[in-house]
Every structure is written in structure tokens, then in C-alpha cells.
Image (tube, rainbow, N blue to C red):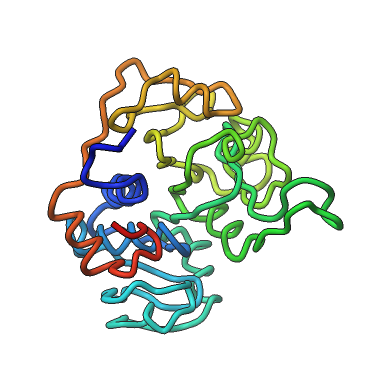
Amino acid sequence: MLEDRRYNLMELMVTVAARQLEDGKTAVIGTGMPLAAAMLAQKTKAPNLIIMFEAGSIAPQLTKLPLSVADSNTQTGALMHLSMNEIMEACQRGTVDYTFLGGAQIDCYGNLNSTIIGGTFQKPKVRLPGSGGANDLASLCWKTLIITPHDKRRFVRKLDFLTTPGYLTGSGARERAGLPPGTGPYKVISTMALMGYDPETLRMRVENLHPGVTKSEIIANTGFELLFADQLPVSDEPTDEELAILRNEIDPQGLIIGKN
């Protein structure tokens, strides 16, 4: 799909993800691609993005890609460095606009699994890192952004384990579970498309196709029935500026975007 292009799929995903973050908003960021996207947003369209990390750092100016949310690089230029208690309290009080997460599996309502694949909880085929702060963040922040590669192993009809709540079973389910009204999944950025959620059914809906991707390809690579917006524009390609910042400033070692 991208054989003749000047960027790879990881770079495309990170740039599309960065464009979803707004200047002046608050966002608790997870490890990996969300970190790269937040850094790119802060260095381009959202210089006043208030980045927060569950380990306690608030409003850093990130200069070096942290390897985790507890990396000392999350503290660079921070206004405050507190603890997980204060970060989760801020989410609970409704003062955090976004959280940005990944996951091993996602279903049509934006529920995430990052705990086990196959088998039982006691004896899984694969044991994953687990929730960390993801359950709390997706439960309490206003909008959840999710970034993940796109294939049938990840986009599944039924999760092997529900780690992090999306819209649970559909309309009204979050509220019945006691989660704050108005919170929930916002966008999913994959290697194939940008997706949102239908306002009535709360099922995942494709809003943009990435360059070179067809509707039939995304259907073939999804394990559940996707909804599609009436108009399907093509996602803007990464600009030369975005690629230069990603490759030279954010991830020169290619830890997330890979080697070029």
C-alpha cells in the first residue's frame, strides 16, 4: 500500500493521531505511539497542550522520547511532578479532556483488552501487561483516543478479556455502570483509517480512509461489522515538517516509527 510513499504506516498513524489533539487541552498520555503523537502535537499544532502522565508529571515540554510514563524524561520542564493520586484525582474531578491509549484488542464499542489472549485468566495463552492506569483513565477522562495497528486479531467481535471500558454494550451502558455521563471513546487511529463512533448506536464508524486503503480492504481486516460515514475523505499525508520532527527530534532511534 505504501511501497512508493515517503513515509511508513507508523509515521502515518502518529501524524494522524497528533492532529486529533487540540491546543490548550489537557491529556493523560500512555506509553508508545501515544507518546510520540503527543510530542508531535506539542511541537506543531498544539504548543500549549497540557500533557500529563499517570506517574505524576504535569505540563512537561518533552524534548526526548520517554520510554514509559514513569521515565525521567516525562519531567522535563514540567510545572509540577506529583504522584498518581493527583493525576487520577484530576481525572475524577473532570478536568482532563483526553486520554490516549493503546491495546491488544478492541471491539465495536471501543472496549479494550490489554490483559490476556486466549485461555483463561489463570492460564492464558499470552499474558499482557494489564491495565496500568488505562481502566481509570478511560473511565474518567472526557474523550478516549486509541491508536493501534489494524487487523482481525486486534479488531475483534468479542474481547478475550475486558480491561478498559469503552461504550461497554452500547447506548446507556457506561452510565448504568456508574461511569460519568458524557465520557467515552472518541477516535480510533489505525494503520488503515480514522474512526469515530455513531452518536445513536455508539458503534465504531469509519470517518477517513488512509491513502491507498479501500473500503473492502478495511472490511476484510476487521472482525466485526463496521459502520461507514456517508462521505469518506482520505486522510492527509504527513507533511515534510511532521516527518522531519518525527525522525530527527522525537524518535531518531526509530523505537516507535521504525528505521527509514
Relative image position of residue 193 (x, y in whole percent): 38, 33
Picture quarter with the C terminus: bottom left
157 vs 253: above or below = above
Q: Is residue 187 visible?
A: no
Total numbered circles: 0
Residue 234's spot in the image, x, y percent?
Answer: 26, 28
Residue 126 located left or right of residue 226: right
Q: Residue at x 50, y 22 (%)?
A: 219
Tell me which corner region of the image, top left, top right, bottom left or bottom right, holds residue 24.
Answer: bottom left
Taking the spot 26% from the left edge, 34% from the top edge, the residue there is: 235
- Check the image and report above or below for 8 versus 250: above
Farthest residue to the left: give it.
Answer: 241
The percent coordinates of residue 194 (x first, y second) are 37, 35
Instruction: Tell me the residue at 15%/47% (across/down).
Output: 239
The one of 249 and 228 positioned closer to us in this rendering: 249
Q: Residue 99 placed where, x, y %? A: 44, 56
